[in-house]
Image (spheres, rainbow, N blue to C red):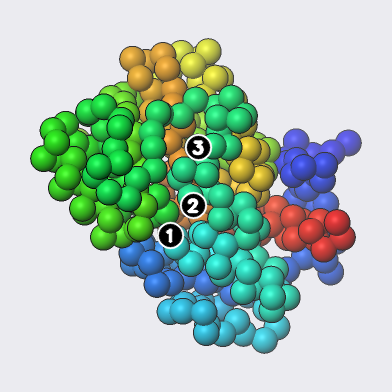
Amino acid sequence: MRSAAAHRLGNFRIGEDSLNMSDKPHHIAVLMGGPSAEREISLRTGTACAGALREAGYEVTEVVVDDENFVVPDGTDLAFLAMHGPFGEDGQVQDILQGRGVPFTGADAETSRIAIDKEKTKEKLRRHGVPTPEGQLVRKLEEITVPLPVFIKPNTQGSSVGSRSATTREELAAALADALKFDTAVLVERLIRGRELTVGVLGDQVLPIVEIRPLEGFYDYTNKYTKGRTEYFCPAQLPEEITALIQQYAIEAHRAIGHPVYSRIDFLLEEDVFPSCLEINTIPGMTATSLLPKAAAAVGITFPQLCRRIVELSWAARQQERTA
């Protein structure tokens, strides 16, 4: 009988003992840093994951990435990707590693390109029946037709970099100018006021919902990464039917972009009834106090165990790709 710890990845199932030891990775290079605006957060993620992977029994080398000329040590079995934002999450580093024949964790290059592009992600969500806020991709103020109030964010950035709301035309112009400092295109969405929620997915296992309550404002870069600025509740206190609905939307969103091995999917819950999917993170923050580890801990998965599962699920995914 297959262990209850097993997870399904496409048509392939993997549990703690489903690979022979000779087939498992031993030496892991944790790639962190990168050239994006999220470099400092990536360094935190990478350092935390390296420590957790060592605790899980792996030989680990930390590799700080500046550009495409990074060096993966000889003898590396798998690259653990801990780079947020462009270059790390947009398929670039995945293409480089695939070209070098180095297996890596998480989404493949094509799935990464979809997930980091918020507008492409929204198209996939709509096709799969996952609700997402009305919005449009723009490059200048005159193109905006979404009525105020709106929320503005760079199309291919994470960590809420360059993101904010606008309720007047003056605020709209200023927010757009700020967002365009980080990207060539900006997503303008109908402003939804509601509860901020996020859902982690490991393989095909949906984790408990985390509710995010900033003490002031929305969950922006400062509230994300400044201790004491935000409260977290896991599992979120929601009616069972709303919990089930959001978790179902989460797994559908995860599959819609191409099944990225693991992900964290962000939602807003309007009027405590209507969930809207905002975006999908294929390399979410991974310190011991980040949102995905919080959700995993709620079902008894420790941080080292979480990192180990990401390694094994990713290893299985790369094996499938080689034999497809």
**Residue 218 at what x, y percent from top left?**
24, 37
**Residue 313 at what x, y percent from top left?**
70, 53
Tell me which amino acid carries mark 1.
Gly
Q: In the figure, is residue 276 to the left or right of 149?
A: right
Q: In the figure, is residue 128 to the left or right of 33?
A: right
> Which quadrant is home to the N terminus?
top right
Q: Is residue 217 visible?
A: no
Residue at the far front: name it: 142
Which residue has dot 3 on it?
Answer: 122
Asked whether 145 or 300 is in front, the reply is 145
Tag shown at residue 116: 2
| Secondary structure type for disc 3 | helix
> Which quadrant is home to the C terminus?
bottom right
Mark 1 and mark 3 in contact? Answer it, CB < 8 Å. Answer: no
Tell me which amino acid carries mark 2.
Ile
Mark 1 and mark 2 in contact? Answer it, CB < 8 Å. Answer: yes
Sequence-wise, the earlier of marks 1 and 2 is 1
**Residue plotted at (46% across, 29% down):** 132
Mark 2 and mark 3 in contact? Answer it, CB < 8 Å. Answer: no
Tell me which amino acid carries mark 3.
Lys
Asked whether 223 or 3 is in front, the reply is 223
Which residue has dot 1 on it?
Answer: 85
**Residue 197 at what x, y percent from top left?**
40, 31
Sequence-wise, the earlier of marks 1 and 3 is 1
CA gap between label 1 and label 3 equals 18 Å
Looking at the image, residue 240 lies above or below residue 79: above
Tag shown at residue 63: none
